[in-house]
Image (cartoon, rainbow, N blue to C red):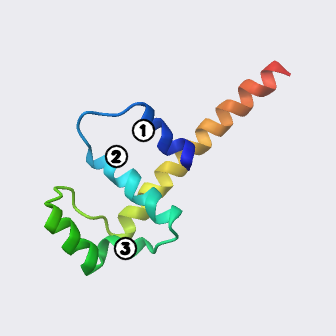
Amino acid sequence: MEEFLEKGRLNPKLYPTKKGFLKHFAAWLIEEDLPFTTGESYGIQRLFKYLDVTFQLPSDTTVRNALAKIYIELHGEVVRELSVSSMHN
C-alpha cells in the first residue's frame, strides 16, 4: 500500500480530484484498521464541514468499491512485474 501511495507523492497533481481523495481515504482506513463506515460518522463529517472540504465523504459501499479498484490495479502491477521477471530468467 505504501508504494501505491508513494507514486502519488512522486507525481503530485496541482488539483486534488475526487478519485484521488477516495483512494487516499480508502488507503487510510486500511492502514489504520478503521471501519469502512468511518466516512459516515458524525465526527468526521463535522470536521470536514469545519475545514470546508468540498469532497463528499464516502459511504461504506463506496469505500469497498474503491478498495476493489485499488486491489485490481495492484494485482495487475504484480502480474506485469512477474511476467517481465519470468521472461528474464
Tell me the number on the disc at residue 20.
2
Which kind of residue does numbered mark 1 sit on?
A: Gly
Which residue occupies 47% across, 72% down? Answer: 34
Give the image quarter of residue 10: top left
Which residue occupies 14% across, 67% down? Answer: 50
Dot 1: few (<14), some (14–19), or many (≥20) neighbours within 10 Å? few
Q: Nearer the viewer, mark 2 or mark 1?
A: 1
User: In this view of the protein, which residue sits in the foreground, 49 or 89?
Assistant: 49
- Residue 62 lies, in percent from the top left, at 36, 63
Give the residue number, with chain letter if any, for mark 3. 38
Q: Secondary structure at mark 1?
A: helix
Tell me the number on the disc at residue 25.
none
Q: Earlier in the sequence, mark 2 or mark 3?
A: 2
5 sits left or right of 20 in the view:
right
Dot 3: few (<14), some (14–19), or many (≥20) neighbours within 10 Å? some
- Asked whether disc 2 touches disc 1, contact meaning CB atoms under 8 Å apart, the reply is yes
Q: CA distance from mark 2 to mark 3?
A: 18 Å
